[in-house]
Image: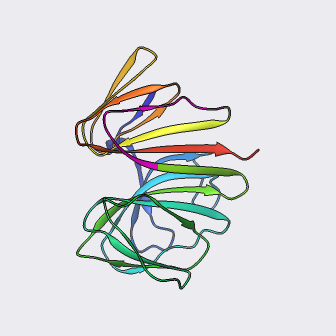
């Protein structure tokens, strides 16, 4: 396992320049906003507005803090996304407008390049287990509070917004803490 501390994440401006993103992990390492194959990040959203467009990218969004936001995706009926909602998957290359429910939010954003990688994001509360990685799969776990992760005899303590790269089956001990299991798979 490899722990990624929230205090060490890379901060950078949004692609549209209207906010800040916090990069948790990216592949290939050091890839720019236009050249990544997959990317896990967080963002603080303080104002209503349009999302940045990412050609040929699929995206999944989850609310980590705040009262939520309503998303209008490619002109469809608005979808309300809150901390209690399941992660929402949508194309990142279509127009998306966000309206905050009641103040700023922080979101978790997972993106993969269509046709090259796929991903899934699952909202979990502890205690729970994570099954091992399949061939070509990478599994991360993001904690929203104090969590203990044990795998192959190794134990890692995570604090709020820390993340861990899980290599084998793992057990997670958490009391009423929400975690996000992120699976990334290379296209066959």
Q: Answer above or below: position of 22 versus 151.
A: below
Residue 60 at x, y = what percent?
50, 59
Q: Position of residue 16 (x, y in %)?
A: 49, 74
Q: Is residue 43 above or below residue 131?
A: below
- How many labels sit on residues? 0
Q: Position of residue 68 (x, y in %)?
A: 31, 69
Quadrant where the C terminus is found in the figure: top right
Q: Does 123 lie within the magenta span?
A: yes
Residue 131 vs 124, above or below: the answer is above
Q: Is residue 124 visible?
A: yes
Choose between 35 and 87: the one closer to the eye. 87
Is there any visible trace of residue 29 in the rendered image?
no
Q: Which residues are magenta?
A: 122-134
Picture residue at 25% right of the left edge, 68% below the top: 67
Q: Is residue 23 magenta?
A: no
- Residue at 31%, 59% in the rendered image: 84
Which residue is situated farthest in the top direction here?
A: 153
Q: Residue at x 64, y 51 (%)?
A: 118
Q: Quadrant of residue 150?
A: top left
């Amino acid at each position: 396992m490899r722990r990624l501390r929230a205090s060490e994440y890379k901060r950078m401006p949004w692609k549209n320049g209207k906010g800040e993103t916090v990069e948790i992990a990216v592949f290939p390492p050091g890839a720019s906003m236009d050249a990544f194959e997959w990317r896990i990040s967080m963002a603080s959203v303080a104002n209503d507005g349009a999302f940045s467009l990412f050609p040929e990218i699929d995206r999944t969004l989850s609310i980590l803090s705040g009262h939520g936001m309503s998303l209008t995706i490619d002109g469809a009926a608005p979808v309300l996304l809150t901390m209690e909602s399941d992660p929402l998957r949508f194309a990142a290359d279509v127009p998306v407008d966000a309206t905050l429910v009641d103040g700023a939010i922080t979101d978790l954003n997972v993106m993969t390049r269509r046709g090259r990688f796929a991903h899934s994001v699952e909202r979990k509360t502890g205690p729970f287990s994570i099954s091992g990685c399949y061939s070509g799969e990478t599994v991360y776990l993001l904690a929203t509070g104090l969590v203990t992760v044990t795998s192959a005899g190794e134990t890692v303590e995570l604090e709020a917004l820390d993340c861990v790269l899980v290599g084998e089956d793992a057990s997670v001990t958490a009391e009423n803490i929400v975690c996000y299991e992120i699976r990334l798979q290379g296209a066959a």
